[in-house]
Amino acid sequence: MPEDVVPEGEQAASGAGMAADIAEQPAGYARLLGEQAPAIAEVAAQIARRRPRFVLYTARGTSDHAALYAAYLTEIRLGIPSGLASPSAITVYGARPALDNSLVVGVSQSGGSPDLVEVLDVAREQGACTLAVCNNPNSPLADAAELVVDLAAGHERAVAATKTYTAELLALLMLVEGVRAGDGRLPAAERDALAALPGLAAALIEDPTAAQLAPRYRFANQLITTGRGYAYPTARETALKLMETSYLAALAFSGADLLHGPLALADPDVPVLALVGAGPAGESMRQVLARLGERRADVVTVGPAAVADSHIRTPAVDERHAPLLDILPLQQLALALALARGENPDAPRGLRKVTETR
Amino acid sequence: MPEDVVPEGEQAASGAGMAADIAEQPAGYARLLGEQAPAIAEVAAQIARRRPRFVLYTARGTSDHAALYAAYLTEIRLGIPSGLASPSAITVYGARPALDNSLVVGVSQSGGSPDLVEVLDVAREQGACTLAVCNNPNSPLADAAELVVDLAAGHERAVAATKTYTAELLALLMLVEGVRAGDGRLPAAERDALAALPGLAAALIEDPTAAQLAPRYRFANQLITTGRGYAYPTARETALKLMETSYLAALAFSGADLLHGPLALADPDVPVLALVGAGPAGESMRQVLARLGERRADVVTVGPAAVADSHIRTPAVDERHAPLLDILPLQQLALALALARGENPDAPRGLRKVTETR
């Protein structure tokens, strides 16, 4: 495993690093579904035997969005209550929650942030089963955890995470479905659906539509992203990518929360990217699109069906699998927009690859 | 209890409604600490007897920020794992998590949103103890719950919630501290600290400093709010108030998450409101302020000590109590800024007082 810290001065200019990271995602999916699958199944089987009563995820930044996806999966697919833990309750205020019969999962690209390590240390003392999902199996986070899943995504060149994010999504999905199966192994139907992923992802990365939208947002200062259910983490991650690479004030809302206040922001000058999947959450986004229409918002939809005049088409898969595909063109949009604005998406101002917070 | 829906055409112009709501908050605190206290203590005692193994909160918009505060309190003060439930897992995807020995709390100003009612219905079927914290004890949410806390905040005039938010904060704090005590009653030290609240709140509302800052943001398009721990809900609620009333793209981040990506946004043109309390979370904000300084961000601090050149002073209370005070000048800033921009904060465009989402 190459180290995750990009040495100073080694970043390629003109977004070549981020572009290469994005392009590697189909291979990353194939690796997790192939050579990494037995190790993930073994961890899933161990978790299934422990029968946790609830699952807490802890993460920062991009990884927090993968954790949010996993929390939805845990509640919906396993019927186990789940949530995101605020590290500060433990690291700043010294909370010591009773965690027997629970699972606490740290999700991190680098495995290097001290606050997540402390949360896993405390969780273990408090009786939790602990799991680290990270791209560095020799990291402090992996050392702190009882169980480890290696994302095996390889060295990430750009500061803005792309291939480690999608690797986190797929590894967490494989874990949850493995726990659901009981023996850790994916059922045939799930295995077949996921086997199509690398090919679908590769075709999507070839599609220039999203990058061609960049000029539309060349002079935008603000942008709203929105989605519901499994698509909400995609909305959050899209907003973060746009903030990190293009310095847009990108606001992510669940479709329902958007109607509870922030809708007032929407007007013809505030563009909206709306995720509209082929399933119940996509269906419930129709109410949101109607209200955005009343506000004459500039809406681009992302999903299998062209609901707005401007549209980024993604494959018609189960909403549960859509986050693994929908983010790909949105990463490309962030890359293209940063370049259109004359920014270097590989090395955003003010950021370091490994962020240490306590 | 007057109804919560503001009839069309009844809103006062020039922010008189929101100003009146803001001004009533000290009296709202006194009411909860006085005549409402026995009823809250009774509910807290019932929860203490049930000894929940975990607590899930469910809410939308402003109430979601009160729920977030309560989740911190639950973990830190009770040592019970806690989280915010996404209604869509249940309402959109039909999740049926196992909720025996758990407490599920719906927090809502109106008690009228169908998705929260459905979450409480399902939670009850799944074995949870259910509690509604709302400003209308005759609402569908209150009907759905086993236990009810009435905020007794009276009719809220403006669409943007202010006095119902702070009533939610205090009611949830009294509940948690009552559960911690075991018999539902606040210990003497806590009672004494809270008895000072109405007076401190009244003095703070008299202070013109925050409203005088409005011209600074007259032409801002974006703004970042940040805080950690107990102050993070205040950062979130401040951002929402500014979005609702002044249509600013206001981005809220925990101090730690800000360093994991969004810091790239900060430059001298993006103002920052930073909550810096008198305690461990405030202390940990020093790292964040230093990084913002490197980015030459325009920072206004809120808290007991003037850390930045521009500062909104709030009383030096325990960080656990600070959310009940710090939000008051920030509500006034939102009101003053909306007026400076020629907007009507009592009736933001595109919003209704009761939002129904499913």
Image (tube, coloured by chain):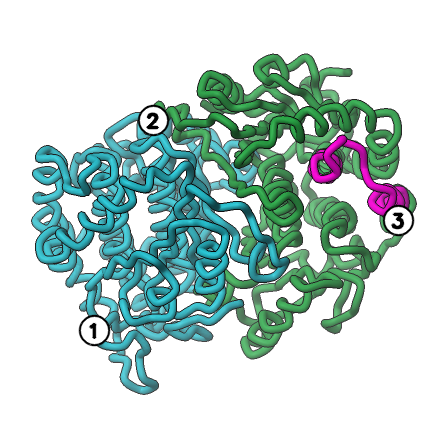
Chain colours: A cyan, B green
Reading the image, the residue beneath label 2 is B93
* Position in image of residue B316 (x %, y %): 82, 59
| Numbered label attached to residue B248 | none
The stretch of residues the image draws in magenta is B174-197
* Position in image of residue A97 (x %, y %): 55, 48
The chain carrying label 2 is B
Dominant secondary structure of the residues highlighted in magenta in the image: helix
* Position in image of residue B98 (x %, y %): 41, 27
| Numbered label attached to residue B200 | 3
Evaluate if marks 3 and 1 touch, with contact meaning CB atoms under 8 Å apart. no
Q: Which of the two labelled residues, at mark 3 and mark 2, occupies the earlier sequence position?
A: 2
Looking at the rendering, in which quadrant would you find the N terminus of chain B?
top right
As drawn, B345 above or below B108: below
Q: Amino acid at mark 2?
A: Tyr
Q: Residue B195: within the magenta?
A: yes
The chain carrying label 3 is B
| Numbered label attached to residue A1 | 1
Q: Residue A54: within the magenta?
A: no
Mark in front: 1 vs 2: 1
Q: Amino acid at mark 3?
A: Leu
* Residue at (52% x, 52% y) in the render: A86
Q: Is residue B40 visible?
A: yes
The chain carrying label 1 is A
Quarter of the rendering containing residue A53: top left
Q: Amino acid at mark 1?
A: Met
